[in-house]
Amino acid sequence: MATVSSGNVVIFGAGGPVGAATIASLKDHYTLRSTDAIPLQQVVDEERRQSAHAPLPEVLGAPHENRVVDVRDYEQVREACEGMDAAINLTVVRPHPEMAFTVNMVGAYNVAKAAAECGLKRLIHTGPFHTGLNHSADYWHDHEVVDDVPLHPGDDLYAMSKYLGNQVTRVFAERQGVETLTYLFCGFRPREILPEQRGRGVGSFTVSWEDTGESILCGLRAPAMENPYEVFFIAAETPDRKHRVDKARRLLGWQASDTWEEMYRRS
């Protein structure tokens, strides 16, 4: 598939903080169709933040577009993909058993199927790092763990449902030719730490919101992948290299500008 260096990009789950970071990084380079289950303006007006200091999405005007789309509804998803060059699926539901599976798994199926039918060049799918690195995995205490380790979601509802969504997108990548980049995240931090946020430390799999958005931009601009389905750790590399991020540097041309050491000192 070709690099998506310009054109039209649809974002599913744009109302969340990763969506906000993605909009901020892409808005000057692509024409965006930002979608969520509720209007983005409502997200902003009601300050529906995932956490106390998580970013809110910018509601863009023309030529960009904002839509209400339920990823559980295939027709809505397909209509949102029409005329697009790439899709980014950031949708997620955590605690609700039925919705977790219908959004995280069925939603992933709908986005991947629509991407294939609409001839999109690239799909970026996202999930939590514990989809592959759950505490029950044999390598939980290992170091220099690479992106391509076998996935071990364990029995956590969130991880299990996102794991199944990942496998759905893998099938579409390998059978339908939808080049798919799966990003695994965990902890997020703002670049600028407020005084009340200090003293909380930094986890071993952390990335700034700003670098998160830049990783999406790099994923769209990257050349054709070595395989139709690729998994990437998106995090600042720790001094002990517990989680290797070499692959993101090599294939995406991305590495965190906010290093783990800098985030630790600011924390």
Image (cartoon, rainbow, N blue to C red):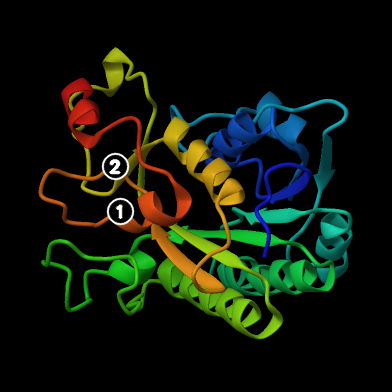
- Secondary structure under the numbered disc 2 in the rendered image: loop
Q: Residues within 10 Å of mark 2 (few under 14, many from 20)?
A: many
Horizontal and vertical percent for residue 259? 26, 33
Name which residue type carries label 1.
Val
**SS for callout 1:** loop
Q: Going by the image, does 66 lie left or right of 11? A: right
Give the residue at x 59% y 38%: 22
Q: Which mark is residue 21?
A: none
In which quadrant of the rendered view does residue 199 lie? top left
Question: In the figure, 134 relative to 18: above or below?
Answer: below
Image quarter (top left, top right, bottom left or bottom right) of the N terminus: bottom right
Relative horizontal placement of residue 34, taking residue 220 as reference (left or right): right
Q: Say which of 41 and 246 sits in front.
A: 246
Q: CA distance from mark 1 to mark 2?
A: 8 Å
In the rendered structure, find residue 236 and report the number of the disc placed on it. 2
Q: Which residue is labeled 1 in the image?
A: 245
